[in-house]
Amino acid sequence: MTTNHEPYGRYVPAGSAASGPYALDIDPRRAGWSHSSLRVLELPPGGTHELAAGDSEWIVLPLTGGCTVGTEGKLFELRGRESVFSGVTDFAYVPRDAHAQIASGAGGRFALAGAKCERRLPARYGPAPEVPVELRGAGGCSRQVNNFGAAGVFACDRLIAVEVLTPGGNWSSYPPHKHDEHRPGVESELEEIYYFEIDGDGLGYHRVSPSRPGGTDVLAEVRTGDTVLIPDGWHGPSIASPGRDMYYLNVMAGPGESREWLISDHPDHGWIRDTWPGLAVDPRLPLYEAASAGSEPERPAAEPGGAANPAAANPAAVSRAAVSRAAVEPGAAVVTPGAAGAAAPAAEEDSR
């Protein structure tokens, strides 16, 4: 095994792929693949940026702060959020061949998740209350998935994007899984980008092991702003250090005719799923839920001893989560959608 620390290689340290206003600028040419892109735009107070979509569709996703997105004769006001650890955010979709102006009165950081595509869909606003918030895994493999751009949740031509939050000390993207070959009904061929942020001055680890001779092989210590590019290979686990929650943004796209998210578990590690029905979901989850319309998302307050207390933030929402947990087998996915959210189809569930 080798650890790849080359800029624009499979492990991309924070700042090594910066370009102009972008703290991160990954496109198919730089990544050495055909579809997936990710930029992280940094705007000062009062800053504006002109985005030319070109042959890709884009989602503008606030990481910190809010902004407006003007495109196709429409103006979308994104309320945004304080940080990726504070709540679900709203977002905007920019179609291919469009031009967009992104402006922020207070400044902020904004992820631009993109995918080379063929169809030109209409520009749209994605409300935060409609983002399905899902709990996956159990025990030390519990994590939260914000399915804002999942297939079956928000319409795109090729782009698939979700956020994953892993409580400190837990493993996510486990068992290791892959989606690097087209096998109808079994596995999709998808290029994937992992963009990381770690709560506080923390660190985590991410592993990609080869699924074929000469395939992607990465073991990386990851900190805020680091990125891992995954054209192929078994990816996972993503490991959050104790006391430091981990966030990552997954951006995926591929050449398949259908926009679907089908994965294969690593044959040596898939057995871990069989243990989840006997375990409870980590009580620290959800770290937060999608806000109801017109309200601010809140992160659960801490109980004595440091455990998150979701009821302190939103008793009604937590009651919904508790009912959901009681209605499924322990360890099964728990879905807490927003006002109009829906669970991603079962075929899309993976090891994230």
Image (cartoon, helix red, strand yellow):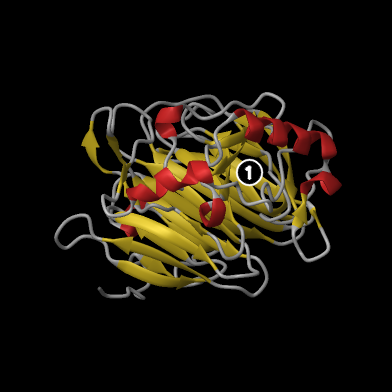
Q: Is residue 288 left or right of residue 259?
A: right
Give the image location of residue 43, x and y in percent. Answer: 67, 59
Residue underneath mark 1: 101
Q: Is residue 131 visible?
A: no
Residue found 23% across the figure and 60% down from its top:
210
Q: Residue furthest left?
A: 213
Q: Is residue 270 visible?
A: yes
Residue found 53% across the figure and 42% down from its top:
331
**Location of residue 1 by image quarter:** bottom left
Q: Secondary structure at mark 1?
A: strand
Q: Is residue 223 left or right of residue 13?
A: right
Residue 166 versus residue 223: which sits nearer the camera? Answer: 166
Residue 135 versus residue 251: which sits nearer the camera? Answer: 135
Q: Residue furthest front?
A: 278
Give the image location of residue 262, x and y in percent. Answer: 35, 36
Give the image location of residue 199, x and y in percent. Answer: 65, 66
Q: How many marks on residues? A: 1
**Location of residue 305 by image quarter:** bottom right
Residue 150 versus residue 65: which sits nearer the camera? Answer: 150
Give the image location of residue 130, x and y in percent. Answer: 67, 30
* Residue 348 vertical placement versus 252 (above, below): above
Q: Label 1: how many residues lie within 10 Å, few (<14), some (14-19) or many (20+)?
A: some
**Location of residue 329 by image quarter:** top right
Residue found 46% across the figure and 44% down from its top:
114
Residue found 85% across the figure and 48% down from its top:
312
Q: Amino acid at mark 1?
A: Gln
